[in-house]
Amino acid sequence: MDPIRSAFEDDPDMIDIVREFVHAFSDRMTALEDSLAKGDLPRVRTLAHQLKGAGGGYGFPQITEAAASLEMVVEEDAELLVIKEKMSQLFEILRAVVVSEDD
Amino acid sequence: MNTELPNPNRVLVIDDEQSIHKLIAARLRPEGIVVTGELDGVRGIARAITESIDLILLDVGLPNLDGFQVCRKLKEHPSTRNIPIIFLTSDSTMEAKIRGLDMGAVDYVTKPFEQAELRARVRAGLRTKRLQDILERQSFLDGLTGLWNRPYLDQRLESELNVAHRYGRPLGLMMTDIDHFKVVNDTHGHLFGDIVLQGVAEELRGYARRSDIVARYGGEEFAVLLTDTPLSAGTFVAERLRASVENRRFEVHDQVVTVTASFGLACTENIVGNVTPEALIDAADRALFASKDAGRNCIHICEGGQIVRVTGSAGLIEAQ
């Protein structure tokens, strides 16, 4: 997958919080994986819901889209396999995100 | 009297996602707006009650209390009722929007939001708040004298009594009534009567400190709430006011007219029994009636259930 960049990377009001948002991806992925492993689907749904709400605002419409798909399959009580599939698609996008580290 | 509207505007974000707080803060900062955030409804409500907040951005999908429940509680509480609420949520169904607006929210923004749209909607919400504040202020002012009106005094009396009780400070209430006002009206007309009311109001306002609340209580009766003021200091204020009303010269058709006023004073420190708003008003009222009975243009105080005429400080000031 091609690298994904925030639409707001050049916005001086935004760059600091975009970096912070991106740096927290690994924690979010861990939380999603752990919740799914424990069978805590409401928590998976909440975490996906939060990423859906925040992604676009941080300049990542792809994250909002993928998180919305994950939230939807959890809401629909889909097969575990389908949920896992949607989660890995979301993770693929999160891992493809790059952000400039120098000011 | 503080007539300034607070600046800068303060927006409270209630959302369970910290990154949304930061995003909104970054987006609203260029508008000169200060953003604070809470992660759940209970804390959010507490924050809105204790701090001065101009607008609330409220998420629907919150843990514990959901956004609609939070909205209902905010609309029920007297100190948060007038804060405009904008729902902020990824639920874009028409039913959710209608439900939110029907519960008293002013607007609805769906996440992820466009920054320009968010800013414009927040600006519109803040405009609503500003107009509401002005309207509320107007509704608490007496049109003729520009003093606070009785509903405002009643409201402040209650909250100032709480403050006085909590910090163990004395709260004084001075009631004053223009003597023979009906005669003034009948002799010189109601327009002149209005000028007298305005003149007396000006004297009261002139002597009041910033923290005092000066109100037209009704007709030709005025009330002054004296914060942090024991009976002795209140008596001093009353005597100065009595003298200043007596010395003010009103002119009508090349004729100089003077009026006098009677005063009654009570203080939370000198009330027997429960210190309620009614008890304080009743004590000051009884003192005022005693001044009327004693021939007017004088001051009585209510001291532990006894009504006493004040002569000491009056004599002292007049002798100077």
Image (cartoon, coloured by chain):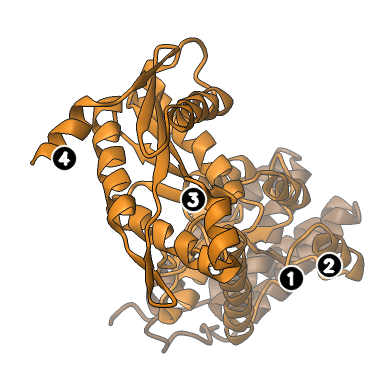
Chain colours: A brown, B orange
Numbered tag placed on residue B280 in the rendering: none
- Same chain? Circles 1 and 4: yes
Of the numbered discs 1 and 2, the one sitting upstream in the chain is 2
Give the mark nearer the N terminus: 4 vs 3.
3
Quadrant location of the C terminus of chain B in the rendered image: top left
Query: What x and y, as percent, mark residue B215?
Result: 49, 50
**Cα separation between marks 1 and 3:** 40 Å
The residue nearer to you, when weighing A84 against B316, is B316
Give the CA separation, mark 2 to mark 4.
Answer: 69 Å
In this view of the protein, which residue sits in the foreground, B257 or B223? B257
- Labelled pair 1, 2 in contact (Cβ < 8 Å): yes
Mark 3 element type: strand
Closer to the observer: label 4 or label 3?
A: 4
Residue labelled with disc 2: B97
In the shown orientation, is residue B107 left or right of residue B213?
Answer: right
User: Where is mark 3, residue-wise?
Assistant: B215
- State whether discs 1 and 3 lie on one chain: yes
Q: Which residue is mark 4?
A: B318
Q: Badge 1, how many Cα within 10 Å: few under 14, some, many 20+?
A: many
**First along the sequence among labels 2 and 3:** 2
The answer to whether marks 4 and 3 sit on the same chain is yes
Indicate the position of residue B144 as horizontal and vertical percent values: 55, 66
Q: For the residue marked with disc 1, what is the amino acid?
A: Tyr
Say which amino acid is labelled 2: Lys
What's the residue type where badge 3 is placed?
Ala
Element under label 4?
Answer: helix
Q: Which mark is residue B108?
A: 1
Q: Secondary structure at mark 2?
A: helix
